[in-house]
Amino acid sequence: MSKKKKESIIEKIENNEIILNKVAGEIVSNTILENDEDIKPVEEFEYEILHVDDNYAEIKLISQIGFEPKTIFNIEIELIGKFNFKQTITIKKIEENIIDILNFMADKMSFIVSFITNEMLKQPYVLPPIVKLKNNKN
C-alpha cells in the first residue's frame, strides 16, 4: 500500500500576486573596520497575516538586509502576498504552513534585492529565497 504524498500548501494556490509595498535602501560609506573585524550578513524577517477569508489570504513579509557591523548597504523591503486558494483556507492552516508561503514570497524578494543592489553598487547581492524567522526552528 503506497502512502499518499502530502500536498504542499503552495500546490493549493490557484493564483497569487506578490506586490512590492515598501522599499528603503542606503549605501553605508565611510565605515572604518578594525583589521580583524568580521563582516557578517544580516537578514531579518517578520511577517503579518493581514487577512484570511474563505479561499483568500493576504500576508505581509518584511525584511531588513544588511551587514554587521553596519557596512556596505542596508535595505528594508516589504512585500504583500495576495493568495487565492483552490479551497477554503483558515488562519490556522496559514500559520502551520507559514514558512512555505514566506519562502514562496522570498523568491520575488531575492530578485528585487538583487536588482536594487546592482543599481546601488554595480554588483548584485543575491539573497537566498529562504526565510528564517527569529524564535523559530526554521
Image: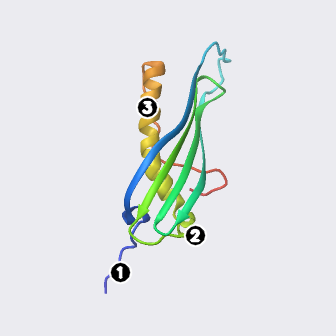
What is the x, y in percent for residue 22?
55, 36
- Residue appearing at x 65%, y 16% in the figure: 31
| Residue 66: image location, x then y, percent | 59, 31
Which circle marks residue 92 in the picture? 2
Q: Quadrant of the N terminus?
A: bottom left
Q: Is residue 69 above or below residue 132?
A: above
- Amino acid carrying label 1: it is Lys
Q: Is residue 96 above or below residue 18?
A: below
Residue visible at 46% across and 54% down in the picture: 82
Q: Amino acid at mark 2?
A: Lys
Quadrant of the rendered image containing residue 71: top right
Q: Is residue 65 above or below residue 99?
A: above
Secondary structure of residue under mark 2: helix
Task: Kindly identify which numbered label has been placed on residue 76.
Answer: none
Cα separation between marks 3 and 1? 40 Å
Which quadrant holds the C terminus? bottom right
Q: Nearer the viewer, residue 134 or 35?
A: 134
CA–CA distance in space, label 3 to label 2: 33 Å
**Mark 3 lies on residue:** 114
In the figure, is residue 3 to the left or right of 95? left
Q: Is residue 66 visible?
A: yes
Q: Nearer the viewer, residue 88 or 111?
A: 88
Q: Earlier in the sequence, mark 2 or mark 1?
A: 1
Q: Position of residue 93 (x, y in %)?
A: 53, 69
State the scheme by which the image is colored.
rainbow
Identify which residue is drawn at 45% across, 39% down.
110
Mark 1 sits on what residue?
3
Which residue type does callout 3 highlight? Ser
